[in-house]
Image: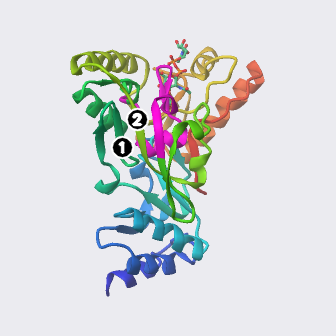
Amino acid sequence: MNATMELQRAPMGSLALPSIGPLAAALEARLSPGAVIRRDEPMARRTTLRVGGAADLLVEPDCERDLAVVVEESQRLQVPWRVLGRGSNLLVRDAGVRGVVITLGRPVFSVIEVDGLRLRCGAGARLKEVSQEARRRGLAGLEFLAGIPGSVGGALRMNAGAWNSMTFEVLDAVRYMGPDGSVVERPAAEVPARYRRCDLFRDHIALGALFRCSESTPAEVEKTLNELNAKRWASQPAAPSAGCIFKNPSAIPAGRLIDELGLKGSRVGGASVSMEHGNFIVNDGRATAGDVLALIEQIRSRAREQRGVELETEVEILGE
Ligand code: EPU
């Protein structure tokens, strides 16, 4: 049996869409040899919260042309697609994800290049790597990215932030692919972004970012990195989580509210509210997505009933 036939056969008990087999076969025929195509890929392995079922199909394109082919074939066969970053802000439901999950995990998408006081970074690059490269070059301004366990693409999509800075505040330009496969580079100032949100990247695929830095020294940048790192570990848990679960409402930070409601330590199955920070739900290794979702609902009801605050999730919730 060749690889294509293996891909066309639906695994036992698969919930996959019927058009997944034909899509897998079409991609097998058209993508570069270095591309990865996997049926029923467990998403728990690809998210920091470590819960959730399998994606029907996971594809790692090996170049931008491959990426355009995945989008084109998915649209032709009417299979929904979406892009996964490092899965650090994601809650995948237990029955998994119907359709294709695309990841920019191949090295070609993670290149980081210095251009004067700017860093040009591929969407697959880890934010930690970006901040380390900036440190090596003595470039300041990207230290806040160091503790965010995501990729550049995820940071663009979420306008990720920490320590009162946000991704779009340090961006000169963004590069992305449209749903028709065309690639565009645009000044970041033309792309609307808000707190934890950039709508462009809901249906456009981030390919890269041009970050703006200021001149400093490696020692100075390292000092700031160490300070932020110490602050982070003093206030946030190390156990598996998806970062902050809720957006901060205007009235009060979600973590303080949940703390004041006495909900730290409350538990559903293997999911509990972190004792270190009220806005984190941690997985003790046994949690299901159902546990996490039930705990989210308990917190939301208490916040609504006792404080009249409507908490909105910050993590993306995906799947069935
Ligand atoms: N607080 C409590 N109890 C808690 C947690 C927090 O009283 O259990 C209080 C703190 O003492 C502080 C306030 O609530 O006065 C805010 O807490 P913190 O400084 O920890 O910041 P945050 O608003 O909870 C935000 C981001 C984090 C980011 C930190 C650090 C959101 C939803 N969260 O947290 O981002 O790391 O600032 O800059 O905007 C994420 O996006 O996933 C995330 C973790």
Q: Which dot marks residue 259?
A: none
**Do tag 2 and tag 1 residues touch (Cβ < 8 Å)?**
yes
Is residue 9 visible in the rendered structure shown here?
no
Q: Which dot marks residue 211?
A: 2
Does 82 sit above or below residue 122?
below
Foreground of the two, 312 or 115: 115
Under mark 1, the amino acid is Cys
Foreground of the two, 169 or 2: 169
Give me the residue at 34% from left, 21% from top. Answer: 229
Foreground of the two, 27 or 257: 27
Report the magenta residues as a range: 146-174
* Label 2 packing within 10 angstroms: few (<14), some (14-19), many (20+): many
Give me the residue at 35% from left, 45% from top. Answer: 125
Q: Mark 1 highlights which residue?
A: 121
Give me the residue at 39% from left, 77% from top. Answer: 28
Q: How is the image coloured?
A: rainbow
